[in-house]
Structure formats: structure tokens, C-alpha cells
Amino acid sequence: MALTATSPSVSTAVGLGISFGVQDGVDDMWGRKPKDAAAAHAQSPSQLKEATHQARVEAAERTNVIIDLRDAELARLELLNEALNPLFAEVPPEVDLFDRGISRGETPRLWIDALAHVAMGRDKRLYRFLHDSRMGRRVLAESYEIPDVVQAVTTYLARRLVERQRALEADPDLLARMSNRMARHYRWRRRRRTLAVLAIGFLAGVAALFALAAVLSPG
């Protein structure tokens, strides 16, 4: 019968019950992970990267919502502006009290003159006719219906026309002085509106580009 020689160290290890057949046990004993587990961990996507990508998508969606809300405000103000066309057609051409127009800033407004304007409420559906004076801002009318706001603007225009007539009767030279001052004021307002429109258009374009880049970004 053939005998197989065994080294003393191996025999001693076998006698002590130490197994050399399980490599994973040795790796675990020395704190090393199996190669397959390490590769799987390296290939799994980072939770932080996924969360960052999701945050970018949500930010882009919020930007789109803000733009949509502003567009809705502008659309409603434009409808009101069209409804006011017949009213302003009745204003005598020599009367320059009113300067109607829509400003497309952060908060869109339909200006009736330098002191009164219509803005949308927080729900973007309520029309608010506001007037600025030395005593502060006050609400002249609030309504969800365009005819109600048109009636409020009609009343405001009639009062302004009566005030103008009384002022001219008391001071015949008032019109000439006011014309020069108001002409300068309206020129400045038109210039400011033009700059505001250009600025808003530029910012909207930049926001749209950032939103698109955030959505298309791989993470």
C-alpha cells in the first residue's frame, strides 16, 4: 500500500482543524470582500447621483410651472385689455390722462394710467383693480368676471375726466404745464417698459436653456 508524505506543518494544521479549502473564509477573516461583491458595488449607481438628477428634473418642472402661470396671467390680462377697447375708444383724443398697456415683468400688470392698474390675484384667476395714492395702495374692485372689471374701470375713467375738467376750469394754464411734465413721464415709462420686456425675454430664454440642460443631463 502506497503512503503519501505529508509535511509536518500541514499535518499540524489538519490536526488543529484549520481548513485551507475555503478561500472566502480567508478573505472574510482579513476583512477583504469577494471580488464579485466589489464589482457589483462598483457598478451600482450612486444614490446621491440619482437624488441629484431627480432634484434637477423637479427644478426644471417648477421652472416650467412658473412660466406657465405667468403666461396664464398675461393671457387673462390680454382678454381684459381687449374688452376695454370700446371704452377707451370713447375717450376724447385730446385727453392724455391715460396710458393703457401691459407690463410683462415678474408680476404682469395692465396699466390704466400712471396710478391705476389691474393685476391677477394669487390664484391667477381673480382680477384686482388697484390704485396707488399718497395714502397707499387700495383696491378699487375685485372680480373673476371681466365685465365687472370693465365697469370698475369705466367708473374710474369717468371720475378722472371730471377731475380734469374741474382742474382746467380752475386753472386754464394747467394743461400746458401738465402736458410737458406728463410727456416726459410717459416717455420714461415707455422706455422702461421696453427695457423690462427685453430683460424678461432674455431671462426666460436663459431659464429655458437651464431647464433643458437639467433634463438632458445624465446625472
Image: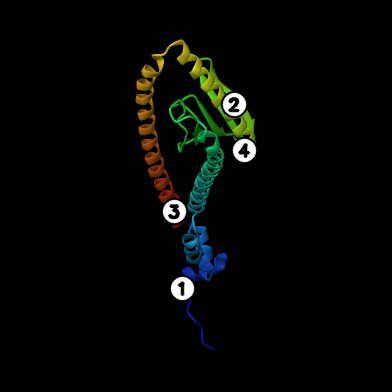
Amino acid beneath label 2: Thr
Amino acid beneath label 4: Ile
Res 79 → quadrant = top right
Amino acid beneath label 3: Leu
In the rendered view, would you say 60 is above or below 200? below
Q: In this view of the protein, which residue sits in the foreground, 178 or 16?
A: 178
| Proximity of marks 3 and 1: CB atoms separated by less than 8 Å | no
| Proximity of marks 4 and 2: CB atoms separated by less than 8 Å | no
Q: Residue under circle 4?
A: 146
Quadrant (top left, top right, bottom left, bottom right) of the N terminus:
bottom right
In the rendered view, would you say 136 is above or below 56? above
In the rendered view, would you say 61 is above or below 16? above
Q: In this view of the protein, which residue sits in the foreground, 192 or 112?
A: 112
Q: State how far apart marks 4 and 3 are (Cα).
A: 36 Å
Quick one: label 3 or label 2, which is nearer the N terminus?
2
The nearer-to-camera label among 4 and 2 is: 2
Q: Secondary structure at mark 4?
A: helix
The nearer-to-camera label among 2 and 1 is: 2
Q: Which mark is residue 155?
A: 2
Using a 10 Å C-alpha cutoff, classify the residue at mark 3 as few (fewer than 14 neighbours), some (14 to 19) or many (20 or more).
few
